[in-house]
Amino acid sequence: MQNRNQTKNRVSLIPIALFIILFFGCIGKQQVRVEDLGISIPATWNAPFPQSQKVSGNWWSIFNDPMLDSFLFRLKTESPDIKTLVQNQELAIQNAKLGGASIFPSINVLTRADTNVQNLSGFGFADSFFNSSSEDDSSGNSEQPSNGVLTFGNKNFGLGLNLQWEVDIWGRLMNGRKAAYKDYESITYDLSYLQFSIMIRSAQLFFNAKEAASQLELSEESYNSLVEIRDLVKERYEKGLRSSLDYRLAETSVATSIVSIENSKSILRSLNRQIEILTGDYPSGTFINKSSLPTALPLIPVGMPASIIQRRPDIRSLVLKMEAASHRVAQSTRDLLPGITINGSAGTSTQDIEKIFDSDHGVWNLGMSVTAPIFNGGRLRSIKKIQESNYENSKQELIRGILKAFSEIEQFLDQNKSLFIQNEALEIAVKQSKDAYELSIERYDKGVTTLESVLNSQRQYNAIRSQQLTIRRQSIENRLSLLLAMGGDLKKE
């Protein structure tokens, strides 16, 4: 009796011991900390930071452009690129489930129907034996065909469950599962950043088309003013008040302005086709035909350089990849330890199919095997070294990614300041060149200056206005790129 109680106590301690082993075996490495990367991060940005509040999720609303709103909405719902990202995310979660499924036991249901037929011709019995035995045979399991060969058969039916489970006593499978889901989170952040990037690049393309439409209007306006000058010169030339040189210069300017208009139209149609492809529409080249570049720019998030690591999805993805690599190092280390596998089955086995659910015909077996690696040509240790190298590579990728992000932001901040200065200077230049152009026309009308001076001042005035449009578009593009580099707002809209 005492021995039986001791046996019971020992058996009751087994689940507790297994729980302790599983709990401590599943503990992986700590999360990645930026302090461990050895990067010197300043407290503030070197380049001047624009004064703004925290960016809102719908950054495009600051432009107050219904066409842009509609375009970005259709982009999110109809774009083949965005739809591909959604499918890739679904693939990522299924791959994660596949990679982490090995920690669970494998249970399969099995149904079996066996029929076995044999004969005694190969055992050397005489025909008389068949004849005599067939007369006395009262069993339905054998029969004597016309050729005298005795056959007999057997049927067996079975229903049951099969179990196979590798007990994760060292946390090897748990580390593999964690690595798989870290990879999934990493891909999710990559796809999130890619979607954000597609939205930003598409908005930049939209404003490129807006600028092209403005440049077209400027070319048409220049053409109209040159036609007015040509008509004035032609009228005076026909009266003998102006030379043929002035008339030919005026006609030349009109002709070249037509070329400028056609070039502007071609650029606008090309950009429109790119936009239409993004939303899955037929590339007719007619998406934008009106010009209006906004003056207000989207706000950008205020934060210290270190906060970029928490904001940018691609940086968070690199952090997760490094954590996944650390789990794989732990997994490869535990591959060197013994493994325990439990195999079992339970069910029924009977010769009558109607008794297949009868518990009286139940059969079962349960077994356990322990496998320990002794010699494998150094394969497991090589795998461990490979995973350690992958971990170091992922660490360097993270460092490069962080430094690249810092470089991008500093560069866009520098460009933001430079573009602001250029735009202020062009505001003055536009006003002065316009006054100079109007003054040259007035002086030419009085015969004080030459037509060449008028045409030069007109070209300079239009060139400065064209340059100002480009700078305004570049300011929008730079601000959107800065928003992308800062990681935008990660909150869902």
Image (tube, rainbow, N blue to C red):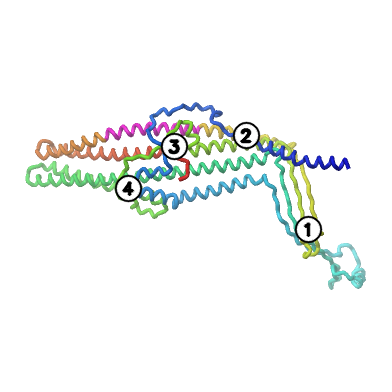
Q: Residue at x 47, y 41 (%)?
A: 490
Callout 2, which amino acid? Answer: Lys
Name the residue carrying label 2: 29
> Looking at the picture, does residue 290 appear above or below residue 130?
above
Mark 3 near mark 2, Cβ–Cβ under 8 Å?
no
Q: Quadrant of the C terminus?
A: top left
Question: Is the magenta region chiefly helix, strand or loop?
Answer: helix
Q: Are marks 1 and 4 in contact (CB under 8 Å)?
A: no
Three-letter amino acid code of the residue under disc 4: Leu
Mark toward the start of the polypeptide (2 vs 1) = 2
Measure the alpha-carbon separation of dots 2 and 4: 55 Å
Q: Which residue is mark 4?
A: 268
Residue 348, labelled with which disc? Answer: 1
Which of the two labelled residues, at mark 3 and mark 1, occupies the earlier sequence position?
1
Is residue 189 rendered magenta in the image? no
- Labels 2 and 4: the sequence-earlier one: 2
